[in-house]
């Protein structure tokens, strides 16, 4: 009974900690803007980079990583299983993606996912950083999917923990779900365009063909209008 209670508290706390929207706070404090109305509309480090200040990505990113690594580490420290530790970290990811304190309008959860890997499978964190860097350089969101999808292969090659495969699958599922949900951004009524937008969301993480136009949207720009 004790372990179940502690697990519940840690997992619940993980969600609440993950819900603290550091990127949104940075936008409000440093620029006086609401990041939900800029660029992709996600409350994320990438939008802090584009619309708040590139230096601000460091404290924001570090905090987002700690949001997941702390409950994951604490669960292990208290003698709970790696499954409970992974659940606590995933709760922080869910909180980051759908934050209680911001009307469930959050970010993609990539930094918080890194926080879990840092504790449970450090080579996985390095692996994901590599693919995130490639995706950033090539301006392609598909590399995140490739990174998550190939993590079990890396784990198998270097005899990583068994938790890696199910955890990667859950992270991949959350990533796809977040891209489809897109912070409740409405879809067009035209069926053919709707299908194109859904495919762009899944594989490109945006609604329009141009990446540059998407990330640089502002409340007063033509690109800020919803499709």
Image (cartoon, rainbow, N blue to C red):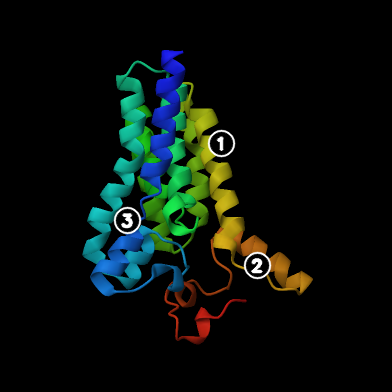
125 relative to 1, above or below: below
Crowding at mark 3 (Cα within 10 Å: few <14, some 14-19, many 20+)? many
120 relative to 63, above or below: above
Give the number of the mark in front: 3 or 1.
Answer: 3
Dot 3: what SS?
Answer: helix
Q: Give percent across and percent down for residue 124.
A: 39, 35
Residue drawn at x 30%, y 52% as measured from the top left: 61
Identify residue for label 2: 197
How many numbered marks appear?
Answer: 3
Identify residue for label 1: 169
Dot 2: what SS?
Answer: helix
Crowding at mark 2 (Cα within 10 Å: few <14, some 14-19, many 20+)? many
Tell whether label 1 touches label 3 (CB within 8 Å). no
Name which quarter of the figure residue 53 lies in: bottom left
Give the number of the mark in front: 2 or 3.
Answer: 3
47 relative to 125, above or below: below
Q: Nearer the viewer, residue 146 or 166?
A: 166
Is there any visible trace of residue 195 in the rendered image? Answer: yes
């Amino acid at each position: 009974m004790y372990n179940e209670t502690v697990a519940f508290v840690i997992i619940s706390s993980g969600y609440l900690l993950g819900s603290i929207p550091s990127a949104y706070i940075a936008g409000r404090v440093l620029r006086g803007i609401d990041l939900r109305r800029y660029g992709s509309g996600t409350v994320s480090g990438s939008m802090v980079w584009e619309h708040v200040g590139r230096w601000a990505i460091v404290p924001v990113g570090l905090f987002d990583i700690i949001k997941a690594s702390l409950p994951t580490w604490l669960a292990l420290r208290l003698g709970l299983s790696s499954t409970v530790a992974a659940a606590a970290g995933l709760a922080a990811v869910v909180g980051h993606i759908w934050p209680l304190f911001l009307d469930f309008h959050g970010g993609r959860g990539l930094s918080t996912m890194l926080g879990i890997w840092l504790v449970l499978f450090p080579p996985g964190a390095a692996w994901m950083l590599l693919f995130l860097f490639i995706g950033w350089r090539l301006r392609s969101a598909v590399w995140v999917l490739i990174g998550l999808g190939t993590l079990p292969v890396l784990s198998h090659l270097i005899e990583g923990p068994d938790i890696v495969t199910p955890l990667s699958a859950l992270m991949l599922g959350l990533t796809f779900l977040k891209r489809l949900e897109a912070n409740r951004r409405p879809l067009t009524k035209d069926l053919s365009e709707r299908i194109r937008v859904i495919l762009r969301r899944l594989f490109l993480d945006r609604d329009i063909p141009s990446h540059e136009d998407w990330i640089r949207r502002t409340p007063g720009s033509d690109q800020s209008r919803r499709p």
